[in-house]
Image: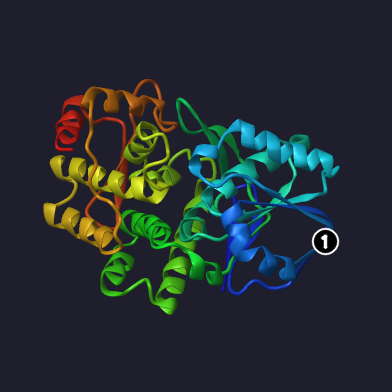
Amino acid sequence: MIVNITLPDNTTYDITIDKLKDIYFDTKVVVVTNPTVSGYHIEYLKEKISAKEFSIVIIPDGEQYKTMETIESILEHCFEKRLDRKSILIAFGGGVIGDMTGFAASIYQRGIDFVQIPTTLLSQVDASVGGKTGINNKFGKNLIGAFHQPIAVHIDPYFLTTLPKREFGAGVAEIVKMAVTFNKEFFEWLEQNDLTNEENIKTAIAKSVETKAWVVSQDEKEKGLRAALNYGHTFGHVIENETNYNTYLHGEAVGIGMVMANALAVKLGNMTQDEASRVKALLEKYNIPTEYKIKDVEEFYEHFFLDKKSLDNKIKFILPKGIGDCEITDKIEKKDVIDVLKGF
């Protein structure tokens, strides 16, 4: 299956969901990956990819290594291999690899092309599509980065065969996010079908990618509609920051963040308690955490202001309107947010 994405400036690329086919690049290629993915799948990739010159850079595995220091190591490899402006980087891994490879590509010689070959469910359904790249720092998540679109995305479900259950659940959280914000019928399908089934997960990947492509094609730089894809992230990013990015996987933090956002939506009358419970039950079906103990409510609240979506000292929240719709608002009273946070 091929999903095409066309951006407002008429930039276009294909997202292919199928077994990886042989690809030849008439240029120098550097594959960026980590020890885990390399250990499982690098030989498989080598069988599929050929180029004028081919090399691999292996960077540490984990969100805590999503730093400028790691970017420097990728760039150093590129300079050592004398990549030019026609050279290509390949992101071969999960969302962390994709974000860092894309960012390195965006700044190497003022920008070169890159290709996404995502290996985790989270990156296949969300992170690999749309051109968001970046790194973290002590102030928050993805606060340094660029919009830099890949020239192609190749999603091969085969890579999911070696994915740990926690990583699978983290990807499911992003699938649920898409359904709650944009597609009630898809959410109901998710309630009725088991995503550990091979055919079902292919269907869910395709549906999620179609949704993401539709949103990005209308709002590439997140001026409006695309911000809805951050449902759960406003709360989730604070959780990740408070736990130094080493307690929860990104999708797990987003899962907790969705539960928090739903609690706020229920308080404001946007969502019924039954609908919030259905979302929570679906997350828990895949062992996604839904609880978090906030140590300092005021401190947690202040962290919201470091979110990229916050403007003019106003916090932008993405809240569901029932299931299948959402709203983006910066008009929520601090008291209401604090009341909800006290519940955690």
Using the image as rendered, state which of residue 40 and residue 218 is in the foreground: 40
Q: Is residue 312 above or below residue 140?
A: above
* Residue 53 occupies quadrant: bottom right
Using the image as rendered, state which of residue 220 and residue 84 is in the foreground: 84
Reading the image, the residue beneath label 1 is 51
The image position of residue 302, as x and y in percent, is 31, 23
Using the image as rendered, state which of residue 64 and residue 240 is in the foreground: 64
In the shown orientation, is residue 164 left or right of residue 155? Answer: left
Q: Residue at x 45, y 60 (%)?
A: 211
The image position of residue 5, as x and y in percent, is 58, 58
The image position of residue 209, as x and y in percent, is 49, 62
* Residue 37 occupies quadrant: bottom right
The image position of residue 122, as x and y in percent, is 46, 56
In the shown orientation, is residue 15 left or right of residue 204? Answer: right
For the residue labelled by badge 1, is the local secondary structure a helix, a strand or a loop?
A: strand
Q: Quadrant of the C terminus?
A: top left
Q: Amino acid at mark 1?
A: Ala
